[in-house]
Image: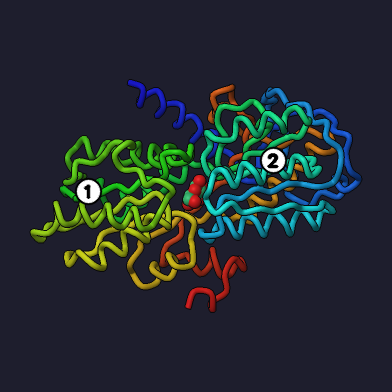
Amino acid sequence: MKKKVLSMVLATSMVAAALVGCGGGASETAAPAADTSAAAEEAPAAEEAPAADAAEAEAPAATASGNKVGVAMPTKDLQRWNQDGSNMQAELEAAGYEVDLQYASNDVATQVSQIENMINGGCSALVIASIDGESLTTVLESAKSAGIPVIAYDRLIMNTDAVSYYATFDNYMVGTKQGQYIVDTLDLDNADGPFNMEITGGSPDDNNAKFFYQGAIDVLQPYMDAGKIVVPSGQIEFATVGTPGWATETAQSRMENILSSNYADGTNLDIALCSNDSTALGVENALAANYTGEYPVVTGQDCDIANVKNMIDGKQSMSIFKDTRTLASQVVKMVGQIMSGETVDVNDTETYDNGTGVIPSYLCEPVFADINNYKELLIDSGYYTEADLQ
Ligand code: BGC
């Protein structure tokens, strides 16, 4: 029942997000004036979003003054966060801000102390991609008392009313696109099956992970109910498929166990639904070492270089492309709007409740990449060079 309600809430978000992409159709919420820098005037050009029907959301008081923005990223280990961080830095600096960019090696205590330093070091706004969405409540109380607005970047920060806004890609849509890719690739509407599937989910402490999982499962559930998709390991629920820390090694050893218990007799694995690229990489390693059957459809997310190379080599079927340049531009725009007391672009005021209420959000639209379109998406757009992928 609970799951149904979540599905409905998520489905609403999907429809809402389908109507608007990054830079389009945003509604706006008013941010109160901050005593702020001249630099905010020069916020970088981003597509003007037409005002939609008013979505009311309370904006927090932003009272800190100055020109420095703190950007807290989780880790340098994963390629995407390096890109997110450097894109944010470049765009903020181009807009005239000073930037304090920190990476926390996926260590929560490190991230907390980096954020403390940003608060004490005079940052006027914080952009935070959390490691553990549940662990920043205390440190963000200080940000709130200091009047420093906080934008949750990509991952929602839970259980704190210090978060002013959330900017991300539509996480539920990431999952539906992965699910739909499987449906289309295996022609599940016409094929009889049954197809064997194993699921590798994301980190349970990352709010996004549930949305990715639920989006994919909502698309695949009818085929599971009809017996066209079966899960030989029996590991289906979110709680049983998670990968703490999104670690490649953890995903790999879990899949090695699943393969040896369920596929060693020559049973084919047809579908490896993986929530992102770091977990897909683990699954691909496990398949390379322990599996001789027909190669499955393998999903992923982020278009990390290693995974795009695997896509080119036929070891991964698709990945979700989340153009971090788009997200960075959107967030820089929001920072400028907050700092200058303008209305802030949001396009979702229903989906992301962090335990203290719904956080006004801007959802960018993810797209899928596979062998047929990766050149256009990734190389022609300048995201990677040909050489990056060799
Ligand atoms: C991000 C994904 C990423 C994962 C692991 C999630 O919060 O949305 O893009 O693959 O974290 O870093």
Q: Give the x, y percent position of residue 36.
A: 88, 39
User: Mark 1 or mark 2, which is nearer the start of the sequence?
Assistant: 2
The yes-or-no answer for disc 1 within 8 Å of ligand 1 is no
Question: Residue 105 occupies which quadrant of the picture?
Answer: bottom right
Disc 2 crowd, CA 10 A, few/some/many (<14, 14-19, 20+):
some
Q: Tag 1's secondary structure? A: loop
Whether residue 110 sits left or right of residue 32 in the image: it is left
Q: Quadrant of the N terminus?
A: top left
- Check disc 2 and give the amino acid type: Glu
* Mark 2 or 1, closer to the camera: 2
- Residue 338's place in the image compared with 327, above or below, is above
Q: Which of 199 and 299 is in front in this view?
A: 199
- Check disc 1 and give the amino acid type: Asn
Q: Tag 2's secondary structure? A: helix
Q: Mark 2 points at which residue?
A: 116
Q: Mark 1 points at which residue?
A: 190
Rounded to the nearest whole Å, what is the CA distance between mark 2 and mark 1?
A: 56 Å
At x 53%, y 74%, the residue is 388
Q: Give the x, y percent position of residue 332.
A: 73, 48
Q: Give the x, y percent position of residue 169.
A: 55, 45
The single residue placed furthest to the left in the displayed view is 265
- Tally of numbered discs: 2
Q: Which of 240 and 275 is in front in this view?
A: 240
Residue 195 visible in image: yes
At x 76%, y 46%, the residue is 69
At x 55%, y 41%, the residue is 155
- Residue 318's place in the image compared with 333, above or below, is below
- Residue 64's place in the image compared with 309, above or below, is above
Whether residue 251 sits left or right of residue 174 in the image: it is left
Residue 21 visible in image: no
Q: Give the x, y percent position of residue 6.
A: 41, 27
